[in-house]
Image: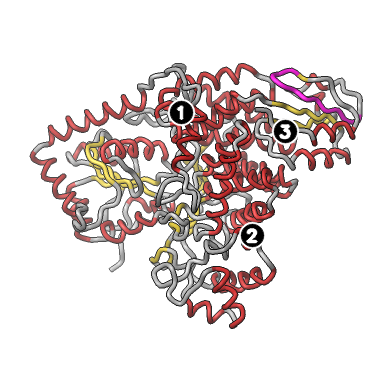
């Protein structure tokens, strides 16, 4: 019998299309669904997930493809499917509900709510049948059906109260005096949670949380704490040695289910790999150890090969599952390895990647270096040749699903990573990739009046941009300016900033997640939690400080200060949840330096100066290169127009610059003497 599609068939989201032939009569999030729920007096079942989510697949197979469950849902509920990556506004709100009601969250996110979008029950994954003290989805549906019939008034009152409490908790922020030792307290809490044997923080499951690692690197410099830097180094090495890193095709998976980083949740996300590029590159700057550059370059190889489209934009993620089995694409049986490698190669692989006949993951092998000494993990030619054989063999397998939608915020984050790493590695190719990605956004996702859209797929642009789209793209434009000296990037950064101030700023404090002309939901939130990604408010705060430093605009620094005050209650209460915001605060408090070099384009001496500068890790120093040919048309740097020397360097601090240095040898000597200020 031919399956009939539901209303998701007309959507572009890969996640929604995965469910388009479920027997459940799914609706996308739309007014039609809510009007029907009111007309038929039915509660709404809202299911939020994403296309590379393993447990979303499991719940689909067990429940949403099940005729019995579908019959119950279709008769008694209006069922709505949402892609969390397309609608982070909905995901943020209803995840807050789930965490408030259950103490935890995750995907698939399962919400039951009234026709006016007010939630009354929340959870995540439910098995079809009740098992191991976990209520089954079928039993839960029947309980809710009974309650809706017999105690609907109670449900509506409960939904009203839940909504009231959620609104209050998300909007009633109480500014207070920010703890003057908050940075030290954050470090102490992270040190207490640090796993001395395997790196990372806390017990399993372990997440990379790169922005926390970046906080610790800055803390290490600012407070001269070798311990902070060693914690990051240990974590980055152990993550690479574990199975969370794909040793054949490269790239990092989402997280590890164990403390050793051995068994990953095999999905690969664009955002994890972008942020980890930054962390490994900065670690290389600090230590000069080749392994960190090698790992950075491997991440770049993966991203450019597997996630970039022909137009230079980046896809969102690669699934954990293939052929319905988690990790099948990435793992190996002993017999499979024997068929690909000769005896000598197999023995080498056994010792190098800890392979056995019995495997370490459901009878299969996750290649890893956990047993290796750190000095043995740099590539050699022999392991490269073995890996090439395995990579070519692996390409013959059925690959995992690729989520090929293009998201503005994640592409902006990849621009940040490519522009920054290209700058410090002195690799113009990476900077060119970053520029190409921005050109795609400019041509497809930005309007002539500097409004952004959030998603592009198959030629369709959809969803008014969220705060993170603007925040991440402003960050990207700042990095592009610092990497190319092209002032048009700085101009666009300011124009997007103006858009944010017009559509997202709350005059009381903070930035809203959605624009003032977007769909009205049960609450308008201001995202602060630095979870898998740095929050949009954290990134906007750092943007304000970065723009203030680049353009000597002290008003922007004052706006950043206001951010710290407004969110101070949250920061004081649980500082380790806001490490990117606290990185911005550390930058605000630190003694900052700006170096401005003025010269002609193609000055051969500039390369030597930049090569020397980027050997150093200087997170509180901003280097700006200005070309004399461009300064007459500059909106920001006219003060440097009268320099008549071949090259000049200004050392600036707190919006004041020393007398310029004109002699090349002296400039290089001053660069060599640079150390960060406490």
Q: Residue at x 64, y 23 (%)?
A: 548
- How dense is the environment of label 1, judged by Cα within 10 Å: few (below 14), some, or many (20 and up)? many
Say if 176 sits above or below 266 in the image.
above
Q: Is mark 3 on a helix, strand or loop?
A: loop
Q: Quadrant of residue 350?
A: bottom right
Residue, disc 2: 375
Residue 229 lies, in percent from the top left, at: 59, 42
Question: Which quadrant would the N terminus be assigned to in this image?
Answer: bottom left
Which residue in the protein does label 1 denote?
515
Q: Residues within 10 Å of mark 3 (few under 14, many from 20)?
A: few
Q: Is residue 18 above or below residue 86?
A: below
Q: Position of residue 206 (x, y in %)?
A: 44, 50
Q: Of 335 and 524, which appears nearest the observer?
A: 335
Mark 2 against mark 1, which lies toward the viewer? 2
- Find the distance from the CA under tag 1 to the CA under tag 3: 42 Å
Could one spot residue 180 in this view of the protein? yes
Residue 517 visible in rendering:
no
Q: Name the residue under label 3.
A: 675
CA gap, disc 3 and disc 2: 28 Å
Q: Is residue 98 left or right of residue 649?
A: left
| Dots 2, 1 in contact, CB < 8 A | no
Q: What is the crowding at mark 2: few (fewer than 14 residues within 10 Å), some, or many (at least 20)? A: few
Check the image and report above or below for 543 versus 265.
above
Viewer-proximal residue, 205 or 84?
A: 205
Sequence-first tag of 3 and 2: 2
């Amino acid at each position: 019998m031919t399956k009939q599609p539901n209303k998701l068939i007309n959507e572009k989201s890969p996640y929604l299309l995965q469910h388009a032939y479920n027997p459940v009569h799914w609706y996308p999030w739309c007014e039609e669904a809510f009007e029907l729920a009111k007309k038929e007096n039915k509660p709404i079942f809202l299911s939020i997930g994403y296309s590379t989510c393993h447990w979303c697949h499991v719940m689909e197979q067990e429940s949403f493809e099940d005729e019995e469950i579908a019959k119950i849902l279709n008769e008694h509920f209006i069922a709505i499917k949402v892609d969390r990556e397309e609608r982070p506004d909905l995901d943020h709100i209803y995840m807050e509900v789930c965490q408030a009601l259950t103490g935890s969250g995750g995907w698939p996110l399962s919400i039951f709510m009234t026709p006016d979008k007010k939630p009354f029950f929340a959870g995540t994954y439910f098995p079809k049948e009740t098992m191991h003290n976990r209520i089954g989805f079928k039993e839960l549906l029947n309980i809710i059906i009974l309650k809706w019939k017999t105690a609907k008034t109670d449900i509506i009152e409960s939904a009203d109260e839940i909504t009231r409490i959620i609104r209050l908790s998300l909007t009633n922020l109480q500014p207070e005096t920010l703890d003057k030792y908050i940075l030290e307290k954050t470090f102490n809490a992270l040190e207490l949670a640090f796993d001395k044997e395997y790196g990372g923080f806390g017990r399993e499951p372990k997440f990379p949380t790169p922005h926390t690692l970046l906080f610790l690197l800055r803390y290490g410099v600012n407070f001269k704490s070798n311990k902070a830097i060693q914690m990051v180094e240990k974590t980055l090495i152990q993550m690479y040695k574990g199975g969370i890193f794909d040793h054949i095709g490269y790239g990092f998976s989402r997280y590890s289910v164990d403390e050793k980083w051995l068994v990953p949740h095999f999905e690969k996300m664009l955002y994890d790999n972008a942020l980890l590029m930054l962390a490994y590159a900065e670690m290389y700057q600090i230590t000069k150890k080749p392994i960190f550059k090698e790992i950075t370059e491997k991440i770049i190889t993966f991203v450019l090969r597997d996630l970039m489209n022909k137009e230079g934009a980046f896809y969102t993620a690669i699934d954990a599952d293939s052929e319905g089995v988690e990790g099948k694409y990435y793992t190996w049986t002993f017999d499979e390895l024997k068929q690909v490698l000769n005896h000598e190669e197999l023995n080498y692989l056994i010792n190098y990647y800890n392979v056995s006949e019995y495997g370490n993951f459901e009878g299969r092998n996750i290649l890893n270096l956990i047993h290796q000494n750190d000095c043995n993990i740099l590539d050699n030619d022999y392991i490269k040749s073995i890996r090439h054989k395995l990579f070519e063999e692996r390409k013959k397998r059925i690959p995992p699903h690729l989520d090929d939608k293009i998201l503005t915020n994640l592409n902006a984050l990849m621009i940040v990573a490519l522009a920054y790493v290209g700058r410090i590695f002195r690799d113009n190719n990476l900077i060119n990739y970053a520029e190409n990605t921005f050109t795609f956004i400019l041509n497809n996702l930005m309007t002539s009046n500097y409004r952004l859209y959030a998603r592009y797929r198959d030629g369709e642009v959809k969803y008014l941009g969220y705060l993170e789209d603007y925040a991440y793209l402003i960050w990207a434009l700042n990095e592009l300016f610092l990497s190319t000296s092209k002032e048009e990037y700085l101009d666009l950064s300011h124009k997007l900033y103006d858009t944010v101030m017009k559509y997202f700023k709350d005059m009381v404090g903070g930035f809203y997640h959605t624009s003032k002309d977007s769909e009205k939901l049960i609450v308008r939130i201001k995202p602060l939690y630095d979870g898998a990604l740095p929050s949009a408010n954290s990134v906007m705060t750092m943007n304000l400080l970065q723009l203030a430093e680049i353009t000597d605009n002290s008003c922007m620094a004052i706006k950043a200060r206001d951010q710290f005050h407004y969110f101070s209650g949250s920061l004081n209460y649980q500082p380790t949840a806001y490490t990117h915001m606290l990185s911005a605060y550390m930058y605000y408090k630190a003694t900052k330096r700006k170096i401005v070099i003025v010269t002609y384009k193609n000055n051969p001496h500039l390369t030597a100066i930049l090569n020397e500068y980027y050997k150093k890790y200087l997170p509180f120093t901003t280097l700006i290169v200005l070309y004399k040919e461009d300064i007459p048309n500059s909106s920001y740097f006219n003060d440097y127009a009268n320099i008549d020397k071949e090259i000049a360097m200004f050392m600036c601090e707190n919006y004041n610059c020393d007398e310029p240095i004109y002699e090349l040898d002296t400039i290089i000597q001053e660069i060599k003497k640079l150390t960060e200020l406490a």
